[in-house]
Image (cartoon, rainbow, N blue to C red):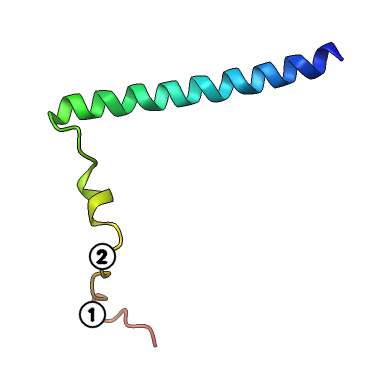
């Protein structure tokens, strides 16, 4: 019974640490860019794809 709680606590702690590190890294990137906005990649996501290069057309 004790090990069941230990596994649950370790899982929650691991997820919390991962989320904390991700938030910290995101804050560092925003600080270095001097811009808290998302990157250009994520802004451009969803637009029409670029045309195929010559010789790579798939039919």
Residue 4 badge:
none
Residue furthest right as drawn: 1
Depth order, front residue of 27/50: 27
Splitting the image into 4 quarters, where does residue 7 fall? top right
Where disc 2 sits, the SS reads loop
Depth order, front residue of 53/16: 16
State left or right for residue 4 relative to residue 10: right
Which residue appears at 80% of the width and 19% of the height? 4
Which residue appears at 37% of the width and 25% of the height? 23
Compared to residue 2, the image places residue 54 above or below, namely below
Splitting the image into 4 quarters, where does residue 58 fall? bottom left
Disc nearest the viewer among 1 and 2: 2
Q: Position of residue 33 (x, y in %)?
A: 15, 31
Residue furthest bottom as drawn: 59
Compared to residue 57, the image places residue 47 above or below, namely above
Nearer the N terminus, badge 1 or badge 2? 2
Residue, disc 2: 47
Total marks placed: 2
Q: Position of residue 15 (x, y in %)?
A: 55, 25
Where disc 1 sits, the SS reads loop
Which residue appears at 33% of the width and 25% of the height? 25
State left or right for residue 6 relative to residue 35: right
Which residue appears at 31% of the width and 29% of the height? 26
Q: Position of residue 21 (x, y in %)?
A: 41, 22
For the C terminus, which image quadrant?
A: bottom left
Residue furthest top as drawn: 2
Q: Position of residue 20 (x, y in %)?
A: 43, 21
For the N terminus, which image quadrant?
A: top right
Classed neighbour count for the residue bearing mark 1: other residues with Cα under 10 Å, few (<14), some (14–19), many (≥20): few
State left or right for residue 22 relative to residue 16: left
Splitting the image into 4 quarters, where does residue 28 fall? top left
Residue, disc 1: 54
């Amino acid at each position: 019974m004790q090990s069941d709680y230990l596994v649950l606590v370790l899982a929650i702690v691991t997820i919390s640490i991962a989320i904390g590190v991700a938030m910290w890294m995101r804050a560092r990137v925003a600080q270095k860019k001097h811009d808290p906005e998302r990157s250009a990649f994520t802004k451009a996501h969803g637009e029409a794809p670029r045309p195929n290069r010559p010789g790579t057309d798939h039919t």
